[in-house]
Each structure stands twice: as C-alpha cells, then as structure tokens.
Image (spheres, helix red, strand yellow):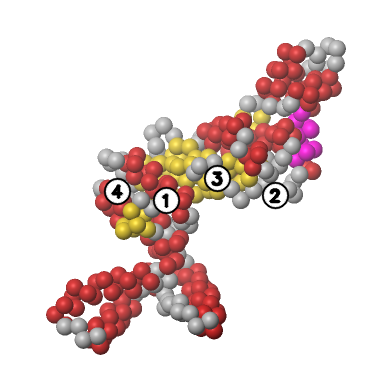
Amino acid sequence: MAGIKAADVMKLRKATGSGMMDCKKALVEAEGDFDKAIEVLRKKGQKIAAKRADRDSSEGAAIAKVNADNTAGVSIVLACETDFVGMNESFVAMATKLAEQALNYTTKEEFLASDFGGITVAEKLIEQTGVIGEKIGLNDFTRIEAPYVGSYIHVGNKIASLVGLSAKIDGIETLAKDLAMQAASMGATSLSYKDFDPAFVASETEARIAVIEKDNIELKRLGKTLKNVPQFISMSQLTEEVLTKAKEAAKAELAAEGKPEKIWDRILPGKLERFISDNTTLDQEQCLLDQKFIKDEKKTVAQYVSSVGDVSVVNFSRVSLG
C-alpha cells in the first residue's frame, strides 16, 4: 500500500466508478500498474455478475433520446435490482450517456458490442455490476425512425416513449410530446385496431365475455345490476353487416318507444356511436389512436392528431421498468 498514491486511486475511481477501497486494493494487486488495476476490477465485476445472474433486475432507469434533427430516437431500460440504485444520480447519468450512444446503432446487439470508453457496452455493464454490487443489464432497446420523432420520459424514469410522425408541421413539437406522453401514461400496445391479429381478438373476446358472465352470477345473487355483456370488443369485428344490424335494432327501439320517425335521424348517430363505444373496449385500452386523448377525453387520439394538421402517426414505442 505504501507505494500507491492518492492521485492514482482517484484516477482509477474516476475511470471505473469503483469505490476508493476497491481501487486501492486493485492498484496494490496490480503493483501500481493502472491498466492492470482496471483489469483486476473488471474480473471482480465478472465474478459478481456470475453470482447475481439469476437475480431479478426490475428496477432501473428508462431513458429516451432523439437525434439532433428529430428523425430517429431510441429508448432503453438500464436495469438494476433496487430502486435505491435506480434513482441514484450517477446511475441515471450513466443510463442517459448510454442512450445517447445508442442513437448511433440500429439493434441492441450492435449497441452492446460498441465501444464505450475502451471496452464494449456489454463489458461496461459487467464492470458496473462489480462496482455497484447489483445485477446491471440492458432490459430494453427500441429504435424508431420517421420524418419527425418526439420523446417523453415519465417522472422518476420509470417509463420512456417515442412517437414517429409523418411530417414536420407547425406545432409538431407539442403534438409529438402530447402523443409520447399519451403512450407512456395509457400503456398502448398497438397503433391501431387494424394491427390486431384476428385470432388474438377472437381469443380476447371469449375471455372477456367469460369474466363478465362470471361476475354477473355473483351480482345476480346479490341483487345488483348486471354488467353489459358485449358482443364485440374491437372495431375490427364491426363489419358493415354488424353496423347495419345495430342501426336496425336502434330503429326498432325508437319505434317501440313511440319516438316520431321524423326525428330518428337526429337520435340514431348518437345510438350508433354508443354501440361502437360499448363494443370497442379492446381498442380503447390498447390502441394509441383509438384511446381517449388524456388532455381532452371528448376526442380520440386520432381526432386530436387530425385537428392539428396534415400529419399522421407512423409508429411509436414504449419501454418501462419491470
């Protein structure tokens, strides 16, 4: 220890982020050789990483970054084991720096193999596992490209989202931020109902109806109002034939109520709108464009986008902890 200078310890600490005592021990083991000391610390990180490989790393920081001309964006989740580490300023700073570098790559594999201060990103994560003492990993990596890309990071770095738009128009910054915030807050998984697999919709319909029917058995026993059992859950199921039948059923209802036929045209649009709303719950939950806009629930997201100008949503992504 006698030949190790404090300045060398500080230099190694700055280079690796390791604790003071770990840096001192590494320099002693390396007989003062700086590069060998770094290798000692890396080997320590590898050993710790191997021991913690099966640990759950569901905390961390979700970060989104967009390039200078807003034509590409990436979002990553740098994961760790505890929120104490995940909220640490140094950890978030590292996650941010990694996200900035990730902008230069199109795949997670390319990014992990890229150089990060003389070692690969993958090696850096192992090194930091040794430094921090928790399993550190890259749990998510997404990239989107579009004529305009916007981003949003939810408070606490728990969720990060990206939205790609078809054109740069007036007000595009606000629109992109609103949509990225919508994606982060409301958890959409698809852009539109048109993206759903028919088999998924059929399976989800069956499952949802089964749940409601089971709930209704208990509600009936308690003498409470039963839940409505929907025929459908997505616009993808509402064919012209289905909508025509719904319209005819609405007319029959109006006739039974004794409503004058001359006012039906004023009532029918509202009834059809209600029918569609009641039978597209899957879209409203999972499709970004079909959700209610969080800043004005009288509009869908698609209606909000149309109100801004001649622009459309090309793609989006959302990453989160867990």
Q: Earlier in the sequence, mark 4 or mark 3?
A: 3
The numbered mark at residue 19 is none
* In the image: residue 51, left or right of residue 96: right
Residue at numbered disc 2 = 56
Three-letter amino acid code at the position of disc 3: Lys
- The residues bearing labels 3 and 2 have C-alpha atoms spaced at a distance of 16 Å
The stretch in magenta equals 41-49
Three-letter amino acid code at the position of disc 1: Gln
Q: SS class of the residue under badge 3?
A: loop
- The residues bearing labels 2 and 1 have C-alpha atoms spaced at a distance of 29 Å
Q: What residue do we see at 78% from left, 32% from top?
A: 43
Q: Nearer the viewer, mark 4 or mark 1?
A: 1
Residue at numbered disc 3 = 158
Coordinates of residue 36 in the picture (x, y in percent): 78, 22
For label 3, the crowd category at 10 Å Cα-Cα, with few meaning under 14, some 14 to 19 and many 20 or more, is: many
Residue at numbered disc 1 = 182
